[in-house]
Image: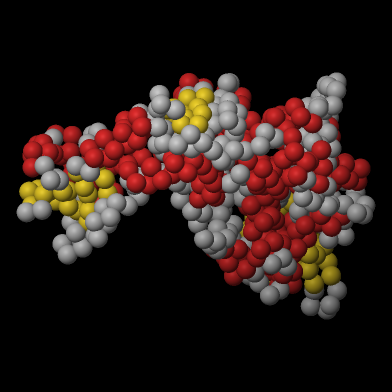
């Protein structure tokens, strides 16, 4: 088929697809929703342009890519034909479009570099230790990102400054670990981009409350489900990682991406360095569930008690249950990240807990229940002293006036707040009950806390309430209409009932623009047909004008009498 005939077949096929299929195809080809196409003939030519075709070929899994190459521009054999038809790479009868055949010839299949020699199988206990370390380290990253989101550069990757911050905090040992774990958090939906930051999602916040094995399982499932199509099996699992670098042979960048996916599964202890599935991940690899009991048996058992000591430290004799660890870290600084973690209480950490909504009573109750050694007197004293000081300034919204009240029993403290230049943005004003601000209560609260004032938040009944400073990613937007709806609507609106007449007009317009030499078949009044070879020069008023090369005269032919047109 000629390019022109190809475009006609493709235009007809495109017009017959539903809106969802068209949107998927245009998205796969990277077509802009603002494309200026006027009809399906424009669309047929547009999707066969060089750049969209390159993208389409790069997205082909190896079996489909090899089927195209084997067809050598002819007809594609089953079973690859339906998938290639759906991708608009072959006609409904399986014939490869000429533009596709030329693109395939210009971009032969690339072979991935040879797979390096595989190491010996990994012991199960070593893989389990990697799983434990990865889950614990990712939790530390999310814990840090809750209040200070991670900066991302223009490409979306973690910034060098953020890698250094994670290393300086003792959370990761190197930049590779930081990059892989942040990527894992994004793939699993635990973090999401927000402006130029990675922020924890609501799913990530809930994930932090789960136990270690459940944390591992949630990320493992989402990582598997996010694998590119060519790496998945029909059963929903994944194929052998040793073959991944060959999965997309038309994409020269694919081998490096395949190694990135392999590294993520290895980091999460789904596979070993040899590509074999970890014992507990065999079910996931087959499309089913992980054997969590097998993993749990190899992990250090979680503990729910700590030793509170007179030097204001707490020692956990094993990995502390995550929900207890999270709360303990709101009131104490975790000093070591080994399986037996240590925590240190200071006036600042206890004050931060009270700022966040804890009270002396809630701190005592929690620590007494958590402790194997009771509540040491020095720690109890520090809690009381800090709590007494933090009750000095209270923030509450006045429902009657809608303003925020700042109260204190110490008038000198209120006088200090009123003249503090750091608090000028709050526009604090004198009031019979203290000070007022038109800023919302949370903004007033955190401005005072950042200025290191002993502040607490109260509800209207006078009870202390919790204030979280979590900077979470915005929830994903609700599903909306396809961005291609206006474009598809325009294409359907321009479609004429007589597609043959529409295509004939299209060919004549192109011939006139190019001043091409064409052969037109005209139906004569007596019912016979005659061919004219013309150099097309004009089209208008329902007539085609051109110079007849055989008779060397100008001819004007009624378009309604033209049966067909083809290159001369």
Name which residue lies at 68% across and 45% down. 217
Q: Nearer the viewer, residue 207 or 264?
A: 207
| Count of numbered circles on the image | 0
Q: Is residue 180 visible?
A: no
Q: In the rendered image of this protein, does residue 88 appear above or below residue 285?
A: below
Q: For residue 532, what is the image quadrant?
A: bottom right
Residue 456, position in %: x, y?
A: 26, 45
| Left or right, 488 with reference to 84 | left
| Left or right, 108 with reference to 198 | right
Q: Is residue 42 visible?
A: yes
Name which residue lies at 51% across and 54% down. 476
Name which residue lies at 46% across and 47% down. 473
Residue 218, position in %: x, y?
A: 65, 47
Q: Nearer the viewer, residue 80 or 566?
A: 80
Residue 206, position in %: x, y?
A: 53, 49
| Left or right, 440 with reference to 145 | left
Q: In the rendered image of this protein, does residue 94 appear above or below residue 62?
A: below
Q: For residue 333, what is the image quadrant?
A: top left
| Left or right, 277 with reference to 400 | right
Q: In the rendered image of this protein, does residue 196 appear above or below residue 179?
A: below
Q: Nearer the viewer, residue 457 or 20?
A: 457
């Amino acid at each position: 088929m000629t390019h022109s005939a190809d475009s006609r077949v493709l235009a007809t096929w495109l017009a017959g697809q539903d809106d969802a299929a068209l949107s998927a195809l245009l998205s796969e080809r990277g077509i802009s929703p603002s494309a200026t196409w006027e009809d399906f003939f424009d669309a047929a030519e547009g999707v066969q342009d060089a750049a969209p075709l390159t993208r389409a070929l790069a997205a082909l899994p190896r079996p489909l890519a090899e089927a195209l190459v084997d067809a050598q521009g002819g007809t594609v054999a089953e079973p690859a034909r339906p998938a290639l038809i759906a991708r608009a790479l072959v006609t409904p009868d399986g014939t490869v479009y000429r533009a596709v055949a030329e693109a395939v010839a210009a971009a032969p299949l690339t072979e991935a570099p040879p797979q390096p020699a595989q190491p010996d199988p990994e012991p199960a206990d070593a893989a389990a230790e990697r799983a434990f370390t990865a889950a614990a380290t990712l939790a530390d990253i999310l814990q840090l990102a809750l209040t200070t989101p991670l900066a991302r550069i223009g490409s979306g990757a973690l910034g060098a400054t953020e890698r250094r911050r994670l290393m300086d905090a003792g959370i990761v040992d190197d930049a590779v670990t930081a990059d892989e774990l942040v990527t894992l958090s994004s793939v699993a939906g635990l973090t999401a981009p927000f402006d130029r930051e990675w922020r924890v999602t609501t799913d990530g916040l809930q994930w932090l409350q789960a136990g270690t094995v459940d944390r591992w399982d949630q990320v493992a499932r989402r990582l598997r489900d996010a694998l590119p199509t060519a790496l998945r099996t029909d059963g929903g699992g994944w194929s052998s990682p040793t073959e991944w670098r060959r999965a997309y042979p038309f994409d020269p960048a694919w081998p490096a991406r395949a190694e990135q996916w392999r590294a993520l599964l290895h980091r999460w202890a789904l596979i070993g360095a040899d590509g074999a599935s970890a014992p507990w991940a065999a079910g996931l690899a087959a499309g089913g569930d992980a054997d969590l009991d097998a993993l749990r048996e190899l992990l250090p058992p979680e503990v729910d008690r700590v030793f509170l000591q007179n030097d204001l430290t707490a020692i956990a004799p094993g990995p502390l249950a995550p929900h207890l660890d999270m709360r303990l870290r709101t009131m104490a600084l975790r000093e070591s990240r080994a399986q037996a973690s240590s925590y240190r209480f200071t006036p600042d950490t206890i004050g931060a807990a009270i700022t966040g909504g804890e009270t002396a009573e809630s701190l005592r109750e929690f620590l007494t229940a958590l402790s194997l050694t009771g509540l040491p007197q020095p720690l109890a004293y520090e809690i009381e002293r800090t709590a007494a000081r933090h009750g000095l300034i209270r923030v509450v919204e006045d429902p009657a006036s809608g303003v925020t009240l700042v109260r204190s029993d110490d008038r000198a403290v209120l006088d200090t707040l009123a003249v503090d230049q750091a608090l000028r943005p709050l526009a604090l004003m004198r009031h019979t009950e203290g000070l007022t601000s038109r800023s919302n209560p949370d903004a007033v609260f955190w401005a005072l806390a950042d200025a290191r004032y002993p502040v607490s938040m109260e509800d209207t009944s006078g009870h202390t309430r919790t204030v979280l400073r979590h900077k979470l990613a915005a929830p994903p937007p609700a599903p909306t209409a396809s961005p291609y709806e206006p474009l598809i609507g325009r294409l359907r609106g321009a479609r004429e009932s007589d597609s043959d007449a529409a295509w004939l007009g299209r060919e004549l317009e192109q011939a006139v623009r190019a001043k091409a030499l064409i052969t037109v078949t005209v139906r004569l009044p007596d019912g016979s047909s005659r061919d004219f070879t013309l150099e097309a020069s004009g089209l208008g008023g329902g007539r085609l004008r051109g110079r007849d090369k055989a008779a060397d005269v100008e001819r004007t032919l009624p378009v309604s009498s033209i049966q067909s047109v083809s290159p001369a």
